[in-house]
Amino acid sequence: MSATSPLIKLREDQKRIEEILKELENQKKEIDAKYASVLEEENKFLEEFRKCRDPYQYSRLEIRVNAVSRRRRELEVKKQEIDRKIRGHQEELKKIKARIEYMKPKGELVTYKEQ
């Protein structure tokens, strides 16, 4: 029984980490979608910004570009943070899988018959 208890605990840890990874992947997809929309918006404003000749309009666009680029930078930080978390959990999952594989019984049980 003592040999199976660590295996059971490792399998529970493996399931827990896999759930965390799924959750992080979902968060990453959401942030990637937000980042893409903010990046598209920033590019649109930058294009208008380059074409603008009116000083008043130019200053208004500059304020909007700065606000959008600030949001983009914040999303980049969140994106990098989630990527680091995903890499860390994936490494931990690899280690757990290797431990499980190492702790599994390697051979078959041989029963001896009395003759």
Image: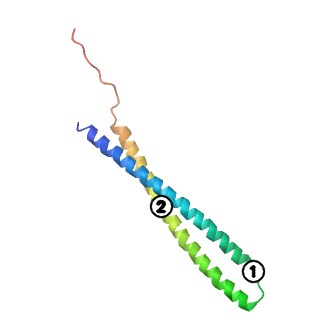
Q: Residue at x 41, y 49 (%)?
A: 93
The local crowd at label 2, few if under 14, some if 14 to 19, many if 20 or more residues have their Cα within 10 Å, is few
Q: Residue flagged by tag 2: what amino acid is it?
A: Arg
> Whole-Å distance between the Cαs marked 2 and 1?
36 Å
- Are the residues tagged 2 and 1 within 8 Å (C-beta)? no
Q: Residue at x 66, y 72 (%)?
A: 41
Q: Earlier in the sequence, mark 2 or mark 1?
A: 1
Secondary structure of the residue carrying tag 2 is: helix
According to the image, label 2 marks what residue?
Answer: 84
Is 73 on the left-hand or right-hand side of 99?
right
Q: Position of residue 23 (x, y in %)?
A: 46, 56
According to the image, label 1 marks what residue?
Answer: 50
Q: Position of residue 79 (x, y in %)?
A: 53, 65
Q: Position of residue 101 (x, y in %)?
A: 38, 38
Q: Residue flagged by tag 1: what amino acid is it?
A: Arg
Secondary structure of the residue carrying tag 1 is: helix
Colour scheme of the rendered structure: rainbow
Is 101 on the left-hand or right-hand side of 37?
left
Q: Residue furthest bottom?
A: 56
Is 74 on the left-hand or right-hand side of 61?
left
